[in-house]
Amino acid sequence: MASYKKPCIQCGAFVDGNVEYCPGCGTSTPFSYHCPYCKRQVTEFENVCATCGKPLRVNCPSCGKPTFTGRTTCQSCGGSLMVTCPNSRCGKDQFYALTKCSECGKKLHK
């Protein structure tokens, strides 16, 4: 059965509409943005997550300019907003402002 390709909102690569990960950039959210704290689906036009109340605009750790938290890179400089979980069994990319990995619970920062 043929499936229509849709652009990944993170990198723009055209991917099958039924995938869970983008083969271009590896994001687990290729067709919608999610709050990095509670995983609720959000839009770029929201300033605060309606579920957890966390801000959806933060200052980029690279350039310091405000950027949307639903993306994996800064809208201004293109710097990464992600850190890799230090747990060798996990290794999942996590939003830089999280204190614990949302997958395994390991502390992300010392």
Image (tube, grey):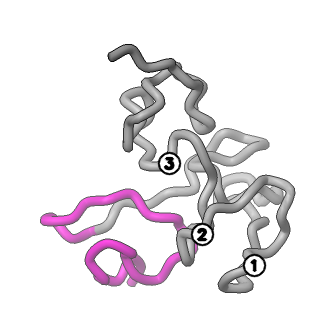
Per the rendered image, the range of residues in magenta is 86-110
Q: Main SS type for the magenta part?
A: loop
Question: Residue 61 at what x, y percent from top left?
Answer: 65, 61
Give whichever of discs 3 and 2 has the lower sequence position: 3
- Which residue is nearer to you in this view: 83 or 33? 33
Give whichever of discs 2 and 1 has the lower sequence position: 2
Q: Name the mark on residue 30.
A: none
Q: Are marks 2 and 1 in contact (CB under 8 Å)?
A: yes
Give left or right: position of 67 versus 36.
right
Q: Is residue 94 above or below residue 107?
A: above
Residue annotated with mark 3: 29
Q: Are marks 1 and 3 in contact (CB under 8 Å)?
A: no
In which quadrant of the rendered view does residue 66 lie?
bottom right
**Most distant residue in the left direction:** 89
- Which residue is nearer to you in this view: 100 or 42? 42
Question: Residue 102 at what x, y percent from top left?
Answer: 39, 75
Asked whether residue 97 is drawn in magenta, I would say yes
Query: Could you tell me which residue is drawn at 43 percent across and 25 percent down?
Result: 16
Helix, strand or loop for disc 2: loop
Q: Amino acid at mark 2?
A: Arg
Asked whether residue 96 is drawn in magenta, I would say yes
Q: Amino acid at mark 1?
A: Ala
Question: Residue 32 at what x, y percent from top left?
Answer: 61, 48
Mark pair 3, 2: CA separation:
11 Å
Q: Amino acid at mark 3?
A: Thr
Give whichever of discs 1 and 3 has the lower sequence position: 3
Mark pair 2, 1: CA separation:
8 Å
Helix, strand or loop for disc 1: loop
Give left or right: position of 55 versus 87.
right
Q: Name the mark on residue 50.
A: 1
